[in-house]
Image (spheres, grey):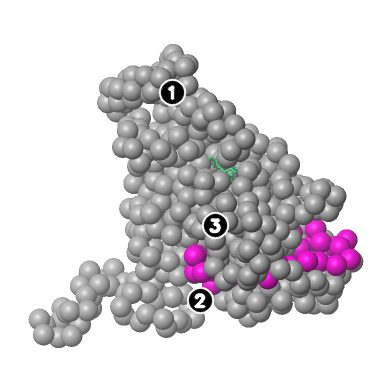
Amino acid sequence: MNTWYWSGAEACGLWFHGFVMPSESDGFFGLSAPGLFDGRALRGGRKRLMKSIVVVGAQWGDEGKGKVVDYLAGSFDYIARCAGGHNAGHTVIFNGNRFVLQLIPCGILRPGKHAVIGSGVVVDPAALVGELDTLAKAGIDVTGRLHLATRAHLIFPYHRQMEKAAEAARGAAKIGTTSRGIGPAYEDKMARHGIRVGDLLDPPRFREKLARVISEKDAVCRATYGVPLDTAGLADQYLALAERLGPFIGDASDLINDALDAGHSVLFEGAQGTMLDIDFGTYPYVTSSNAISGGACTGLGVGPTRINAVAGVTKAYTTRVGSGPFPTEMPDLEATEVRDRGKEYGAVTGRPRRCGWLDLAVLRYAVRINGISSLVVTKLDVFDTQKEIQICTGYRYKGSPIKEMPAAAEDLAQVTPVYRTLPGWQSDTFGVKDMEKLPRAAVDYLKFISDFLDVEIGMISTGPDRDATIVCAGTELAKWI
Ligand code: IMP
């Protein structure tokens, strides 16, 4: 059963079953030409019926958002990416085929669904065209369904070149980035000398902007890293790629707002995770965009009142790639078992992921920062062989318990996790689709998480396949599906 929410001043907080399309005749100022002193005249605005949800990573990325978004996408009309770039790697296994999508929202794999790349995303056109080729080879037609924001910023090869030089210069303090040029592209955006997707549609303007930026950057690169920028043939190469991308480029904010106005449903697909957020993550060991739910508003040009729910995705344990503090990281031997069972190798870079116990201090923080209304727990089956499971319920810092998440990475690196030990279930949960079929100890583990965080668990994933999923009956999340 779908639940559709009324949003805005009309009926904030109430919800109804069933969906009523807004009437075309309800003009912007509402119902039947109210008089000036009729209360309705001041209330303004037509009734907006919306179904929109943000799916966000609650940890350090790689929580399995790809599978969750793919599953939920069946119940939404538009699936929109709001931040990050081809540093993200969403893996979806469907009909025995494995798709790793880095830029295009995985909703594109479902016929008839619209996939939107928002203005908060940084786009490498060569990577995007590569993905279009992969989809075409798999027989997936994106015509009229893929939309690319004209305001999204472009990644150029010089961003990668500068990133590699910067990482090398950091030495042992390197961030361990994905080397995709993500950070430098966002730097340019914020420094106001970025070049945007829409610029590709006006070749003379594009050439002029690129020439200006190249001369600036070449000087910086020579002075800082002692190497020149490699930019030969760049403008021609990008304008050739633009021929492929042109039909998809448009105003993504208008598209999404119009879709919501027309009663269509929208799923905002987060990339990376809360602890990699540029503002609220383990800075500076973070990515360069807002990976939290608020990024949906800034990255797509939608107001916060247009978002109804936030699903936070967490693994049954924790992983991270790259450098930075990770309080519940397991010693090597334990990590190896989890890494092998969970196939914890980067979808984009192939790097082995660092593995650790579930950290409820991180999740409590994520629930707060994102306003998570439902949790989705993935990869429960990876713990099937554990005799006992440790779960972190908080930290001690310099001998005393602390309540808040330390803001400084240096402080987080010094905390000692406080663990509870819970019994493992030591039985097979791989592919289980019914809550009743989960072993008692697995249900107790999930209940512990939900009770501790005071948030419902709306969905559980027990394997990579689309149907290895438990939707928890009676939860708010289940009503969206
Ligand atoms: P960047 O996003 O390439 O600048 O990398 C910055 C940090 O974010 C590094 O630690 C990366 O490993 C991490 N990171 C970026 N994207 C992802 C992702 O999709 N999953 C997990 N970690 C990521």
Residue 261 visible (yes or no): yes
Q: Secondary structure at mark 2?
A: strand
Q: Is residue 337 above or below residue 176?
A: below
Q: Earlier in the sequence, mark 1 or mark 3?
A: 1
Q: Pinpoint residue 325: horizontal percent, then vertical percent.
A: 63, 51
Task: Please give the residue where the numbered disc 1 appears in the rendered image.
Answer: 224
* Residue 380 is covered by the magenta coloring: yes
Q: Which mark is residue 274?
A: 3
Mark 2 or 3, closer to the camera: 3
Q: Is residue 162 above or below residue 301?
A: above
Task: Please give the residue where the numbered disc 2 appears in the rendered image.
Answer: 3
Q: Amino acid at mark 1?
A: Thr
Q: Pinpoint residue 217: horizontal percent, then vertical percent.
A: 38, 23
Q: Nearer the viewer, residue 278 or 20?
A: 278
Q: Amino acid at mark 3?
A: Thr
Q: Quadrant of ligand 1?
A: top right
Question: Which residue is at 85% across, 67% downward?
Answer: 388
> Callout 2 environment at 10 Å: few (<14), some (14 to 19), or many (20+)?
some
Ligand 1 within 8 Å, label 2 CB? no
The magenta segment is 366-393
Q: Pinpoint residue 3: horizontal percent, then vertical percent.
A: 51, 76
Q: Pinpoint residue 162: horizontal percent, then vertical percent.
A: 48, 27
Distance from disc 2 to disc 3, alpha carbons, whole Å, reads 27 Å
Q: Earlier in the sequence, mark 2 or mark 3?
A: 2
Q: Earlier in the sequence, mark 2 or mark 1?
A: 2
Q: Do labels 2 and 1 touch, CB within 8 Å?
A: no
Q: Secondary structure at mark 1?
A: helix
Mark 1 or 3, closer to the camera: 1
Q: Is residue 176 above or below residue 433?
A: above
Choose top left, top right, bottom left or bottom right for residue 184. Answer: top left
> Callout 1 environment at 10 Å: few (<14), some (14 to 19), or many (20+)?
few
Ligand 1 within 8 Å, label 3 CB? no
